[in-house]
Amino acid sequence: MHELSIATAIVEQAERLARADGADRVSAVTVRVGELAGVVPDALHFAFEVARDGTALAGARLEVEAVPALAWCGGCAEEFAVGMPPFFWCPHCDRPSQELRSGRELEITGVEA
């Protein structure tokens, strides 16, 4: 379960950000997780609960913002959902797409003290 190492990294980074702002506790962390990032949100929530114990995030909640996988078709200038498993073929003009616009994100977007 690689979500535990991801959750541990989130906790460590959130602690650093909170301390840099002069806070000693964190009440919430918001992360963006792309559909193609290979992270299972339920597993990440569980791992976060384990990783936060004994830290400045003890009792903090994890808010996960799911980011859909979207591709861009240069042929017809349309954006479309790639889906899961990913399919990079434009449903509008029936051509392959070469540009993934979103879906691989894994980033902290907010830390609330």
Image: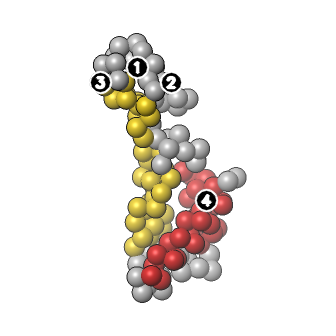
Determine the secondary structure under disc 3: loop
The correct choice, above or below, for 64 with respect to 17 in the image is above
Give the CA separation, mark 1 to mark 2. 9 Å
Under mark 4, the amino acid is Ile
Under mark 2, the amino acid is Phe
Residue 23 is drawn in which quadrant?
bottom left
Give the CA separation, mark 3 to mark 1. 10 Å
Q: Nearer the viewer, mark 2 or mark 3?
A: 3
Give the CA separation, mark 4 to mark 1. 33 Å
Q: Marks 2 and 3: CB-CB under 8 Å?
A: no
Q: Position of residue 88 (x, y in %)?
A: 48, 24
Under mark 3, the amino acid is Ala
Residue at mark 4? 6
Determine the secondary structure under disc 1: loop
In this view, the residue in front, 72 or 63, is: 72
Q: Residue at x 44, y 24 (%)?
A: 97
Q: Could you say which disc has been placed on residue 77 in the image?
A: 3
Residue at mark 1? 90
Q: Residue at x 40, y 19 (%)?
A: 90
Q: Choose the circle earlier in sequence order: 2 or 3.
A: 3
Determine the secondary structure under disc 4: helix
